[in-house]
Image (cartoon, rainbow, N blue to C red):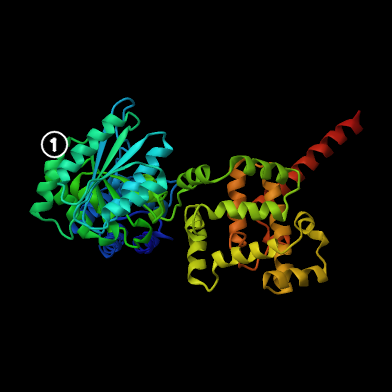
Amino acid sequence: MFESISKGLENALSLFRGQGKLTETNVQLALRAVTQALLEADVNFTVAQEFTERVTEAAVGREVLKSLDPYQQFVGIVYHELVNLMGPVDHSLHLRRGELVVLMLCGLQGSGKTTTCGKLARMLQESQWRPMLVAADLQRPAAIDQLKIIGEQLGVPVYSEPAGAGAVKVCQNGVAAARQADNIDVVILDTAGRLHIDAELMQELEQIDLKISPQQILLVCDSMTGQDAVNSAKAFNEALELDGVILTKLDGDARGGAALSVKAVTGVPIKFIGVGEQLDKLEPFHPDRMAGRILGMGDVLTLVEKAQREFDAEQMALQQEKMMRGKFTLVDFRNTMGQIKKLGPLQQIMKMIPGMGKIAEVMGNSDIDPEEDLKQIEGIIDSMTPRERENPDLIDISRRRRIAEGSGTDPADINKLLKEFSQMSGMMQSMAGMSKLQQLRQIKQMADVGVFNPGADLKFQKNRSDRGPLDKRAEQEKKKKMRKEAKKQRKKNRR
């Protein structure tokens, strides 16, 4: 996601490394690179131009802070302007208990509108709302059947009528059926799209808007179409006065031009983003988090929210308790990997963690496939007996050969896994008693030595010169404690 613009901005911002202060000359040099990065990412020309002008004004007109180097200061300015460019956003759909709310989804054919209706219905279900889908796309032959299949998957009712009915009438009858049902809170209208914007499409949508008066009109745009998505958003907004935009296929959009341009060109906020084909892959759009991702700062908040949705809290609490008691086994390790896989591809997860974007990029450019490595590790652990998983020390040469044969690997792979698990579990156990700040530093240290890359050859610090900041801090605390004890002992001796 956004690889093109992230790399372009990174190259532009790197021009400040080693500079003593911000000057008009080095700012202009960097801004030319920023403008080029934005245009190459298919950002609207006017939007790119105005963005760089605001950054220039803020950078040149700002007093240089002694505590910040030019690189940090300029990154902060670009981050602030990116947030302003994409926001603010109101994610609320203005739903009200006890009152039927109608949401109308529109968009061009092929934008993922019907699937997005299902994703939105699922999101509402998770918040204890009771949605109903209305199949009002009568232009695409498979649209009604597709919506019915989605409805069955979610357990959501779908209102449809035989071929020949008008879209406006279907919407009216669908809303009337929802009112009579008494167990529906939200009606989602799946309206027709075209391969291009035309008068017939707009007239039909305007009639639905006039007759139904939906509380929210949301436009579904394919982010991978770049400026075409922005242009269609502008045309739809002029005809319907949109309340928000849903950008689909953002997980496959390497440029990001649509996400950076839609709000600035149309004035309509991006409310949600589609990040996958599955019905649970719809997320609220947060400009600050997206700006952080673009600048390589990660997105911890979204990662935490994903974890809260996907992880088994009871199982994780049990595993943490076992770690604190030094009882973290290969069974727990495998269960933890299973939960992490629920969050998505490992490289995408790592990009959400500050400081690990580069590591994820290196992994992506190497021959190592972390997903395949995880499968191999799972296969090795599954080939062990219950006793071996609980107590890896039992695994001798003959057992390694048996496990290797059962998992289709080499005995050397078993030996490597056991060695790395022993080293990693020790580091994880040491984190149990740390503060959150210390844990983050330890995670960074673990990333530096390759803990999060299953295919890496881990090189843990062995001598004092190679020790990380936490090792040195622990040694300093130990020496400090020893000095205090020695001081107390001298006082006792004087008495």
> Which of the 4 image quarters holds residue 417?
bottom right
Q: Is residue 166 left or right of residue 416?
A: left
Identity of the residue drawn at 27% across and 30% down: 179
- Say which quadrant the C terminus sits in: top right
- Say which quadrant the N terminus sits in: bottom left
In this rendering, is residue 104 above or below 447? above
Neighbor class of circle 1 (other Cα within 10 Å; few <14, some 14-19, many 20+) is few
> Which of the 4 image quarters holds residue 208?
top left
Identity of the residue drawn at 67% across and 45% down: 319
Identify which residue, 424 or 125, lies in the foreground.
125
- Regarding residue 73, the answer to whether it shows in the image is no
Looking at numbered disc 1 in the image, what kind of residue is underneath it? Lys
Q: Secondary structure at mark 1?
A: helix
Q: Which residue position holds label 1? A: 211
Q: Position of residue 50 (x, y in %)?
A: 21, 52
Identify which residue, 443 or 220, lies in the foreground.
220
Q: Is residue 466 left or right of residue 201?
A: right
Q: Is residue 460 left or right of residue 348?
A: right
In this rendering, is residue 361 above or below 343? below
Identity of the residue drawn at 32% across and 28% down: 182
